[in-house]
Amino acid sequence: MKIGVLALQGAFAEHIAVLKRLNVDVVPVRLPHQLEELDGLIIPGGESTTITKLMVNYNLAHKISELAKKNFPIFGTCAGMIVIASGVANGKIEPIGAMAIKVKRNAFGRQVDSFETELAIPALGKKPFVGVFIRAPLIESVGKEVKVLAKLPDGTIVAARQDKLLVCAFHPELTDDLRFHQYFLDIISGKR
Ligand code: GLN
């Protein structure tokens, strides 16, 4: 399996490291032709304003949105989730609109308000998953084609799936727990 990690800005190196631990081929994607022959793409956390601008400048935005329409597997984490959303409540940002979720940026406050919390994610098994939230967005609403995967105790949606599109508001690549990435690989191979 060959997975691309969008490597324009943000936490791409950490995602690449996790994928290597899972023994898949990894391509750091900076140029449009690098999107060819991939089985899936991860869009990492970082700054969604910067990532979306660079995606346009590097001629990647259109191509990634075309791929998403063809049911190409994409996993967006944190800023990457904002990038593939269909609407962003706050901030001047144009997401590619691949997934029927509306998100709110910086929903938990500033950098100093970043936090870690144990999440129940039934799709990953019984053991809780530690969510690392760094100036994280939240999912305000989801379309009927979207399956909610995780919520905070107050009901805030923080992870979801729509067919082969997967998103989470937190940073699974910053923990030693490989289950979220493995879940994405299982979606690609049709096991999940
Ligand atoms: N605050 C960032 C944004 O709005 C997301 C933060 C992150 O990816 N950790 O793009």
Image: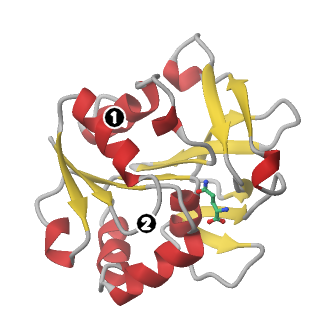
As displayed, is residue 134 above or below residue 174?
below
Q: Badge 1 is on which residue?
A: 18
Amino acid type at image mark 1: Val
Are the residues tagged 1 and 2 within 8 Å (C-beta)? no
Q: Disc 1 and disc 2: Cα gap in Å?
A: 17 Å
What residue is rendered at 75% in x and 54% in y? 111
What residue is rendered at 33% in x and 60% in y? 71
Q: Badge 2 is on which residue?
A: 9
Amino acid type at image mark 2: Gln
What residue is rendered at 58% in x and 50% in y? 146
Reading the chain from its start, which is encountered first: label 1 or label 2?
2
Q: Position of residue 112 (x, y in %)?
A: 80, 49
Q: Position of residue 156 (x, y in %)?
A: 80, 43
Q: Position of residue 81 (x, y in %)?
A: 55, 58
As displayed, is residue 188 above or below residue 93?
above
The N terminus sits in image quarter: top left
